[in-house]
Image (spheres, coloured by chain):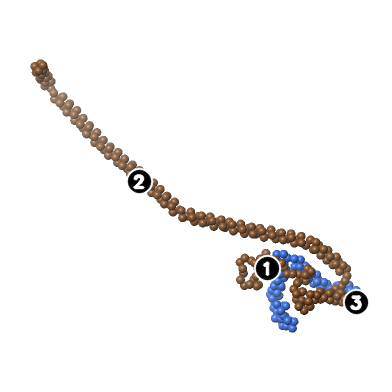
Amino acid sequence: GLEACLMDTRLFNWKSQCLAPLPPLPEKGGEVRYGLIPEEFFQFLYPKTGVTGPYMLGTGLLLYLLSKEIYVVNHETVAAVCILSVIIYGVKKYGPAVAAFADKLNEEKVATALAVKNEAIKSLETAIEEEKKEQWRVEGCSYLFDAKRNNVAMSLETNYRERLLTVYNEVKKRLDYQVAMQNLKRQKEQDHMIQWVEKSVVQSITPQQQKESIAKCILDLKALSKSVQAAV
Amino acid sequence: MLLDVKLGQLPTWLAMRDFTPGGVVGALRRGYDRYFNKYINVKKGGLGGISMLLASYVVVSYIWSYSHLKHDRHRKYH
């Protein structure tokens, strides 16, 4: 966290606008000779004193410190010498191995970050594809709605016609009923009238008339039989 | 910038410096940032980055304890 903001301040110090993807870290740090003195010091003295200048300076400085006993040689010096020798031996022997291990750790970190980035890019690309497909589907929607509209109109028409048929049947039934009623009434009137006429006729035939009519019928029959006998 | 100052102009350069607490803190921060970004915040940082810090710590602690070490000198007059 802290180192991240320091990394940002590196840019803020130099350039006024900040770049959206951060530039990659430099590959190697500043050169350091013998692990203690930066290379710039040697370069600084090279024009005036050549290659051996800094070493002569170092030797002179060391002798001055020792002779004036600004650096005092006591038990701590022995301890320092032992510790330094052990450290230098350790660094020379295991330095490359540790460096390789650290590099591997870094590689893994970078690889996971890159994998996440690629995953994100891929998922976004598939999302774009899906979106395009949805847009294509929306275009086809108009056809779908036309078909549905046709279906609905068809069913409305069918329903309307069914109801029309029902209405027609109902009206016909009522009219048939009226017609049947009228027919029945007329029939009944006719029957009643016939019966009444028969009854009155039968009543009006008095016994006297009955005798006279029977005698007349016998005379007619005789006449007929005579005409038939004559014809044969 | 300090390296660009000529030796004769050093007092004037020192007078120009900002010695308020904020200025001092800013100078320390800038120095820290420069050192950090040059030697430590790199892909393949070497031993020099921390060893220089440890060596400077050793030197500074020696200087602070010199008044005690003076008594261990082998000769009185040099």
Both on one chain, marks 1 and 3?
Answer: no
Q: Is residue B50 above or below residue A64?
A: above
Type of amino acid under label 3? Lys
Q: How many marks?
A: 3
| Mark 1, other Cα within 10 Å: few <14 / some 14–19 / many ≥20 | some
Q: Dot 3 lies on which element?
A: loop
Can you identify the residue that label 3 sits on?
B76
Query: Circle 1 marks a residue in which chain?
Result: A
Find out whether the residues at labels 1 and 3 contact each other: C-beta distance under 8 Å. Answer: no
Whole-percent x, y for residue B78 in the image: 89, 78
Whole-percent x, y for residue A77 in the image: 86, 69
Q: Residue furthest front?
A: A50
Type of amino acid under label 1? Leu
Can you identify the residue that label 1 sits on?
A6
Q: Dot 2 lies on which element?
A: helix
Both on one chain, marks 3 and 2?
Answer: no
Question: In the rendered image of this protein, which colour is used for chain A?
Answer: brown
Q: Mark 3 to mark 2: distance in Å? A: 130 Å
Pick the quarter of the image with the N terminus of chain B: bottom right
Q: Is residue A215 visible?
A: no
Both on one chain, marks 1 and 2?
Answer: yes
Find out whether the residues at labels 3 and 2 contact each other: C-beta distance under 8 Å. Answer: no
Type of amino acid under label 2? Tyr
- Sequence-wise, the earlier of marks 1 and 2 is 1
Can you identify the residue that label 2 sits on?
A160
Query: Which label sits in the foreground, 1 or 3?
Result: 1
Q: Dot 1 lies on which element?
A: helix
Question: In the rendered image of this protein, which colour is used for chain B?
Answer: blue
| Mark 3, other Cα within 10 Å: few <14 / some 14–19 / many ≥20 | few
